[in-house]
Amino acid sequence: MQPSSRAQVYGQIAAAAAGVTLLLTSSVAQRAASKSPMPSVTFGASVGPMFAKSCVGCHGERMPKAGLDLRTAGDILQGSSSGSVLVSGKPEESKLYTMVKSGAMPPGGPKVGPAGLKALREWIASGASIAGSPGGHWAFIPPVRPKFPADLTGGWAKNAIDLFIGDRLKSSGLKLSPQAPRQVLARRLYYDLVGVPPSPVELDLFLSDRGPRAYDSLVDRLLADPRFGEKSARHWLDSAGYADSEGILQEDLVRANAWRYRDYVIRSFNADKPYDQFVREQIAGDEISGYRTAARFTPLMLEQVTATGFLRTAVDATRADFNTHQFAEYQYRMLHDTQTIVTSTILGVPVQCARCHDHKYEPFSQRDYYRLQSIFQGAVRPMGTLLPTAARQIVAAGSEEVAEANAANAKVDAEIREIVNRETASLDAARMRALGSGFVQIPASDKAALVESVR
């Protein structure tokens, strides 16, 4: 796969980060984007029980026939040994539906009745959502705004979150804890938002503010504090596996430019950057920036290229002194770790298990694993000259800037050469003068060697 293919798929991965699986159908994404309600027929409530009654005897846990497992929606999406059995949104083109409708399946046991057939058709037509599947993964379920519970707080609720707290307290037979003292609230805010306790001056400033918006003002002030980005970025950097050194071999080589990516993440949190933009820049910032053909290297280009440091956080031991087979081994390790970081951080699923076999509980096959990994192949040169980690750098300059720099350097280089030539001639003359009158007494056969040694 060509490196540019990454630009074509980053949108799919970013969409998956919002709760839509990379491998499921676009209808789920469209429904989530339009904020339309989830379908009335779900796998867990209607389709799954029907299959459990009539089908899982043959298509269940113990060597399912034709390689088709019907226990969960994820299993169904993986298909059978001969391929897909479901076309999302199109029941009449789905082998799963047509075989049941014709009566060919199940061959024995209780047949699927009209109600079950209708439920299966509606489930496929509505997008075959994995929501409600007992084997469904939370990362594939589009978020749905819940209904607010009734106000059972007796008046202390100040926002929607308080309503949920009040409802849970009521159902558990518990009461709200007493209001924390203001100095305790201040310390909690400081630790949660900027990671350090308030100074005595800052604490006194808050305690002396008796206005109705004192607490809100403190929250706003801490959110605007540069330390907020430093505190919040730690969670993402930990998930991404950020480190200032390679962490492999006894040398533990320092990553000279790793700090640039760290600071990018901090700036993004402090700027309240939208999450979809945050994800796109880290996966394909070099592709969307267009820096390769730009005349001028803009600050935005630098920001987007720096963001792809996300794809450099995996342990990478590629070295110029490694031979071919060692390079291939460490290259694969790096690609595997990079893919694991990207999928676990953004998709929330352990795709790495599929490198050896089709995934059992998520709709990822071994083929999917290696197709996804090919996206990152452009970062190395598997068929060309080894490019060690330390050499994977770019010049932050556009074509015009490079031309200007080359022209300026050429002028300076010419001046330097002229100065060096004058210096050499002056030194030669000075050294010859230093030989003095004794030079004429040296045999002619030795003079040339003497002059060369003097120079």
Image (cartoon, rainbow, N blue to C red):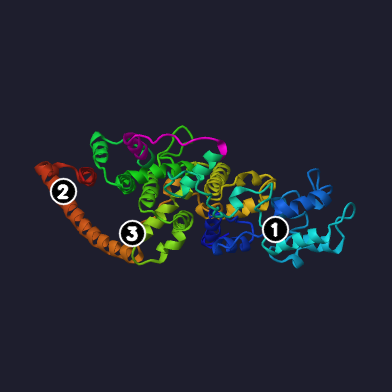
Q: Where is 366 relative to 7, above or below?
A: above
Q: Secondary structure at mark 2?
A: helix
Query: Is residue 174 in the magenta section?
Result: yes
- Residue found at x 83% / y 63%: 101
Residue 308 coordinates in the image, percent (x, y) = 44, 53
Residue 207 coordinates in the image, percent (x, y) = 26, 38
Q: Is residue 216 left or right of residue 416?
A: right
Q: Amino acid at mark 3?
A: Pro
Q: Mark 1 or mark 3: which comes first in sequence? A: 1
In the rendered image, which residue does mark 2 sit on?
A: 427
Q: Secondary structure at mark 1?
A: loop
Disc 2 versus disc 3: distance between alpha carbons? 48 Å
Residue 172 coordinates in the image, percent (x, y) = 56, 36
Q: Residue furthest right?
A: 108
Query: Is residue 330 in the magenta section?
Result: no
One can see residue 92 in this view: yes
Q: Where is 198 relative to 85, above or below?
A: above
Mark 1 touching mark 3, by CB under 8 A? no
Q: Secondary structure at mark 3?
A: helix
Q: Which mark is residue 299?
A: 3
Q: Which of pointers 2 and 3 indicates the residue nearer the eye?
A: 3
Residue 102: image quadrant is: bottom right
Q: Which of pointers 1 and 3 indicates the residue nearer the eye?
A: 1
Q: Mark 2 or mark 1: which comes first in sequence? A: 1
- Residue found at x 63% / y 50%: 369
Q: Which residues are magenta?
A: 171-190
Q: Is residue 44 left or right of residue 252?
A: right
Q: Which of pointers 2 and 1 indicates the residue nearer the eye?
A: 1
In the rendered image, which residue does mark 1 sit on?
A: 41
